[in-house]
Amino acid sequence: MRLRRGADTARDCDPSPSPDIRLNKLEGITDQHRARTVEAHFQITDFDETVYDQPKVGPKLTRVQIRKSYHGAIEGSGVVEVLTAQGESGAGFVASERIDGVLEGHRGSFVIQHGGVTQGDTQSTYGTIVPGSGTGELAHIAGQATEAQQEVLTLTYTL
């Protein structure tokens, strides 16, 4: 609330906050809820694949356990359970991954479920942050996650 010069009564007061105060309040809310997109680079530190079905005709089915080390926008680690279908002309995967570490200064963990399919040179990926899976400073994280580039997780999120 601002008093106008010479104001001595309530009716002489301007009840609206100054433009600077309004802007700062809106920026704070916007920053907190604005979706951010980051690319988190990772290295695979452990890869253990087991074939659980390999028919004479058709794609083989595998289960893969992967451990990752993240650096950049995410500093931390990931543990992944992947199911794959690997055929001669195409492949697909579905995965659940827990990421534990620091995302742009916010410490905690969260789970993503993601997958993809390939046919020849064409690849399609999708993924989401599992609602309610965040812990610590990432407790309210929500958004999308994809691995469209090799060893890069693209994360679009809000906190």
Image (cartoon, rainbow, N blue to C red):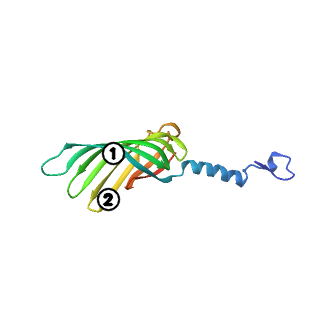
The kind of residue on which mark 2 rests is Gln
| Pointer 2 local density, CA inside 10 Å: few below 14, some 14–19, many at least 20 | few
The kind of residue on which mark 1 rests is Ala
x 78%, y 50%: residue: 2
Is 85 positioned to the left or the right of 130 in the image? left
Are the residues tagged 1 and 2 within 8 Å (C-beta)?
A: no
Q: Which residue is mark 2?
A: 123
125 or 11, which is in the foreground?
A: 125
Is 127 positioned to the left or the right of 104 in the image? left
Q: Tag 2's secondary structure?
A: strand
Locate residue 98: give its quadrant: top left
Q: Which of the marked residues, 1 or 2, is nearer the chain's N terminus?
A: 1
Q: Which residue is mark 1?
A: 95
Residue found at the very far bottom of the displayed protein: 121
Is 137 positioned to the left or the right of 123 in the image? right
Residue found at the very far top of the displayed protein: 136
x 38%, y 49%: residue: 127
Residue 103 location (% of width, % of height): 50, 45
x 29%, y 62%: residue: 121
CA–CA distance in space, label 1 to label 2? 16 Å
Q: Tag 1's secondary structure?
A: strand
The number of numbered discs placed on residues in the rendered structure image is 2
| Pointer 1 local density, CA inside 10 Å: few below 14, some 14–19, many at least 20 | some
Residue 36 location (% of width, % of height): 51, 52
**Mark on residue 54?**
none
Residue 35 location (% of width, % of height): 51, 52
Residue 22 location (% of width, % of height): 68, 51
Residue found at the very far left of the displayed protein: 56
x 53%, y 47%: residue: 104
